Image (cartoon, grey):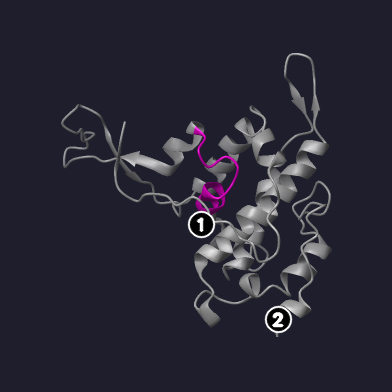
Amino acid sequence: MYGSFQRIPYPTHKSPMDGDTAHRDLDWVYASQTDRIYVLRVGDFGVTRQQKLDLLQNFFWPALARWVVSRQLILPGGTILGGWWRADMQGMMDWYRECLHMTARWEDAIIAHTDGIWRTALETSPWRDWPEFFLLLNEPVVDANGQAVRDAQGRIVYKDRDPTTDGMEDAFLDVWEAVANSRPLADFVDRRTAKDGDLLASRTRATTDLCV
């Protein structure tokens, strides 16, 4: 059913979203429905979660980034007008939910709001290494007295923060919206877009405790 001869190539010359909205572009919708990696569930016919994340990271994000950069106006002094908007990230999270067979916002907004997909989207996005998101992704390890645990060098020990906690998605979107346009994404936008069947290995994240 999803043989390569039936594939509709992703229209990477345009945005995965319909203009400036969070609604998905129909050409991208049609292409995604012919892509076995996108459509099949993890575990079906050898499809892995990593393949799905590679697809979103190397096809969807670069296409959206090029569209956003094309609508930007950089004023003297570096102020950016018309850059990233909240709808861009909300729309991308909808793509992640569908690709990973999660509950869509329009099916149950309460479930979707606390599914933690914002973390997955961030960690496979152009902002994955930005320090502004550190405290959203991590929290201090505390002892029985509620005091932060420190290592032998006196550094606070951190662990992964639960991304499904109520309010975390809104907190992430607030931070992202505030910093997304603060630095250019030229290196990300200018890189070669992956071709169909040429998914690149995405960055993997360590799950061990961090110390800073």
Is 13 on the left or on the right of 115, as rendered?
right
Q: Tell which tag, 2 or 1, sits nearer the viewer.
A: 2
**SS assignment at label 2:** loop
In the image, taking residue 62 as reference, residue 200 lies left or right, namely left
Res 3 label: 2
Q: Quadrant of residue 58?
A: bottom right
SS for dot 1: loop
For disc 1, the marked residue is 114
- Segment colored magenta: 118-130
The amino acid on which the numbered mark 1 sits, given as a three-letter code, is: Thr
Report x, y in % for residue 143.
18, 40
Residue at image location 81% in from the left, 46% down from the top:
20
Judged left or right of residue 70, residue 188 is left
The three-letter amino acid code for the residue at tag 2 is Gly
> Is 163 rendered above or below residue 147?
below
* Residue drawn at (76%, 43%) of the image: 66
Q: Which mark is residue 15?
A: none
Reply above or below: 186 against 164.
above
Q: Residue drawn 54% across and 48% down?
A: 169
The residue most toward the bottom is 1
Marks 2 and 1, how far apart in space?
35 Å
Q: Is residue 22 above or below residue 37?
A: above
